[in-house]
Amino acid sequence: MRHTIVFILCFSFVQILWGQPKDIWIRFYDTATDLSGYKDLNGKIQIPAKYNNFTRADTFHNIIAVKEQMDSSNEEYYLLKDGRQVGQDSVFMFDFTYDCESEGKIIFNDKKKNRVGFFDKNGVVIIPAIYNAATPFCNGLAIALKNAKRSCWGENEDTLNCDHLGWKGGETVIINDKNEILVDSLKEYPTNINWYSLKINDPSPAP
C-alpha cells in the first residue's frame, strides 16, 4: 500500500540555519584574469583561479559543476575535491546557470536522451536521467517533470530555431532521494509548500 503524504501549505518562507562544516572551500575571484578558484577557510588556495564565470558555486562541499578556461577552448565537467572529473558530457545548465550541490546531490543532463537525473556527492548516479526537468533537493524532496514535450516559449512553435526552449504538458511529481514518487499529478508547480512539514502516515489499515 502506498504511503499517504500530507504537506502543510503556508505562505511564509522557512529558513533553516545550518552550521558551516570546516572542510568547505570558498570561491574567490581573480580580477586580473576574470577567473575563479577556491580557497579553504584558512585562506589557502586549494584550486587556482582557472574557471570562467559559468562556475557559480560559491561554496565547494563535495561536487561542483565547472567550466575550465583552456588555451583554445573550454571544458565542462563535475569536479570532486580529490581532483576527479566526472560527467564531462552531462553538465546541466538552465538559463546559463549550472546547478549546485544540494543535500549531497546535483542535477546532471543526459544529452542523448534529453533527460535529467541526479549524481550523489561522489559523482555516482543516484537517480537515473528519466525526467524532463527537476529542482534541487530540499529536505529530502524534489519536484520533477516527466512525459512532457519540448516547446518554445512564446508564440514560436519551431523548437529547432528557438532561443528559449521549455517543456509542455507532462506530469509534475514530488520524489524523494530513493526516486520514489510521493505525490503525483500535481496540476501546476507548487509555490507555497512548506518543505519542512512533511508527514508520512502509517500505511497499515486501521483496525
Image (cartoon, helix red, strand yellow):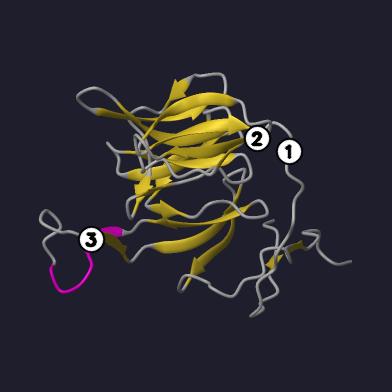
- Within the magenta stretch, is there residue 152? yes
Circles 1 and 2, Cβ within 8 Å, touching? The answer is yes
Q: Nearer the viewer, residue 15 or 122?
A: 15
- Amino acid on which the number 2 mark rests in the picture: Ile
The residue pinned by badge 1 equals 21
- Residue drawn at 53 percent across, 28 percent down: 124
Q: Nearer the viewer, mark 3 or mark 2?
A: 2
Coordinates of residue 150 in the picture (x, y in percent): 24, 58
- Residue drawn at 32 percent across, 51 percent down: 96
- Residue drawn at 28 percent across, 24 percent down: 70
Q: Quadrant of residue 120?
A: top right
**Which residue in the rendered view is the most extreme toward the right?**
207
Label 2, residues with CA under 10 Å away: few <14, some 14-19, many ≥20:
some
Which numbered tag is attached to residue 164?
A: 3
**Height in image: 132 above or below 50?**
below
Label 3, residues with CA under 10 Å away: few <14, some 14-19, many ≥20:
few
Q: Quadrant of residue 108?
A: top left
The CA span between labels 3 and 1 is 38 Å
Circles 3 and 1, Cβ within 8 Å, touching? The answer is no
> How many circles with numbers are drawn on the protein?
3
Which numbered tag is attached to residue 146?
A: none
Label 1, residues with CA under 10 Å away: few <14, some 14-19, many ≥20:
few
